[in-house]
Image: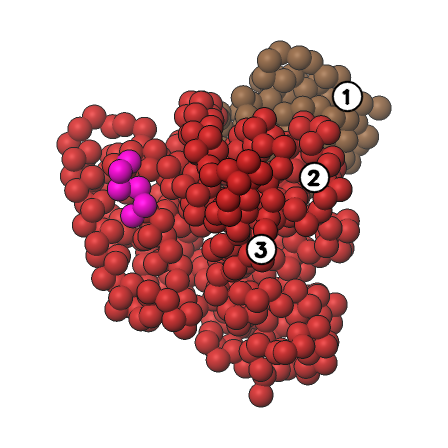
Chain colours: A red, B brown
Amino acid sequence: MNAPVSHNPDSDAWTTPLDQLDPSHPARFQNHTMWPYFARLRRDAPVHYSTTSPLFGPYWSVTRYKDIMTVEVNHKVFSSDSGYGGITIRDRPKDLRLPMFIAMDPPRHDEQRKVVQPIVAPGNLAKLEGIIRARVCRILDGLPRGETFNWVEHVSIELTVQMLATLFDFPFEDRRKLSFWSDCATAVPEAGGFIDSEEKREAVFAECLAYFTNLWNERVNAEPRPDLVSMLAHGEATRNMTPREFLGNLILLIVGGNDTTRNSISGGLLFLHQNPGEHAKLRANPGLIESMVPEIIRYQTPLAHMRRTAVADFELGGQRIRAGDKVVMWYISGNRDEEAIEEPERFIIDRKRPRQHLSFGFGVHRCVGNRLAEMQLKILWEEILRRFPAIEVVGEPKRVFSSFVHGITELPVRIPA
Amino acid sequence: MPHVTYIEHNGTEHRIELEEGLSVMRGAVDNGVPGIDADCGGECACATCHVYVEEPWLAKTGTPDEQEASMLSFAATAQPNSRLSCQITMSAALDGLVVRLPEAQH
């Protein structure tokens, strides 16, 4: 029997027989003991079949950078289609699966993605830069001094949710609904939180869909505008979506714009706290923010994996993957692969090729918002350095119970008065 | 050795000698030409080594394959003469090649 949460992961990871190894349990990600299991797999079984998961059924783990890239670019063999189970390790009940363009294959994926892609075109990013900077300044200037507060709540969530509200042109005073819906969409029922059943999740989704349907109706009859709801309402490939498909794409855009950057914002602060040498380097040369930002995103890997389903037999790393098999690309492991990245275990803010990481995925599903995410982090760090000589991390981080969202829920910090 | 001229979006030109068999992306990255990100390192998987091939060279550089065309179709700044420079391999026939860089890579 494979114990999901071992008392001694460092030895357990190396002694558990390979055929009983299951790196996917959310508890391991919450208590951050998953690392040695991935190190073991990279060394001993880089393409590994697990049959012992109590939550997710049998699945392949792909843990090396190079093999992950092979899966990424072979979308004809490795399907993202929600009909096969979509893009996460968990198989939701068939009737509850949401169609969304990340969980579609070309050509339908391409058509829908192109509708929203202009939101992050260079011209639009330049426009957003000023807005982001003004908001970052306001958020940072409003932080308490000389007392302990949760950085995640006050900065990471607030900043990303404001950004998302702008992208949707969503009523600003209601913006926390967005992070609530995002958290509900990714919540693992076994965590025992608010979303403890699929029924509860569906109820929240219904609320989200109703709210956005109002926005859609208001915009579909108006002139096209550069916000995501208007773009979907007017886009040729999206204007006739079913309500379920509209909801799916909303959830995709909400989670994509929320949970990811949020956790890189939190992670960055933690990594600099854990690496005082790198922090000193940054303070001495703020120009390093440019290369630090992608390093934060690699080191955090805010989405631990993406899943595909093989639609044909495929030979990978000497293993025969069969049509129908679930294949999990562990980005969090590929980003620690010593064969692809020099000293991958270290957080180094001036790497030569910092953008060579898997956190955004590669191939046709590569993150739409990757440069926007980087821009938010860059501006945040520029303004932090301008204001605060120090932000002290005064307690241990609390993490999300999930093997998909690799996130931080609490990070107690204190800004000296 | 054959050479490539990279013209940045702001007009700055870089004349780079490039060994045959290497990609046009490599020539930019290894010589610090700004404006080519090449996040995926040459796997045709990210579209951040996007260039515009100057008209006289279009026939010689060929046309994008399916994967490249698909990646390019997501680039906001794509034009009919867009290519991913990791997919153009240097050869004697391409000596003198001129490529322009887009406003930004995405």
Q: Which residue is mark 3?
A: A395
Residue A112: percent from left, percent from top: 35, 43
Label 3, label 2: how far apart the Cα atoms are: 18 Å
Q: Quadrant of residue A37?
A: bottom right
The residue under the point 62% across, 67% down is A34
Q: Which residue is mark 1?
A: B16
Same subunit: marks 1 and 2: no
What stretch of residues is rendered in magenta?
A: A172-177
Q: Which residue is mark 2?
A: A279
Q: Nearer the viewer, residue A411 or B54?
A: A411
Q: Nearer the viewer, residue B24 or A224?
A: A224
Indicate the quadrant containing the N terminus of chain A: top left, top right, bottom left or bottom right.
bottom right
Q: Quadrant of residue A91?
A: bottom left
Name the amino acid, label 1.
Ile
Q: Is residue A111 above or below residue A386?
A: below
Label 1, label 3: how far apart the Cα atoms are: 52 Å
Residue A221: percent from left, percent from top: 15, 32
Residue at the top extreme of this rendering: B11
Label 1 or label 3, whichever lies nearer to me, is 3
Q: Chain of mark 3?
A: A
Tell me if label 1 and label 2 are in contact, CB under 8 Å. no
Indicate the quadrant containing the C terminus of chain A: top left, top right, bottom left or bottom right.
top right
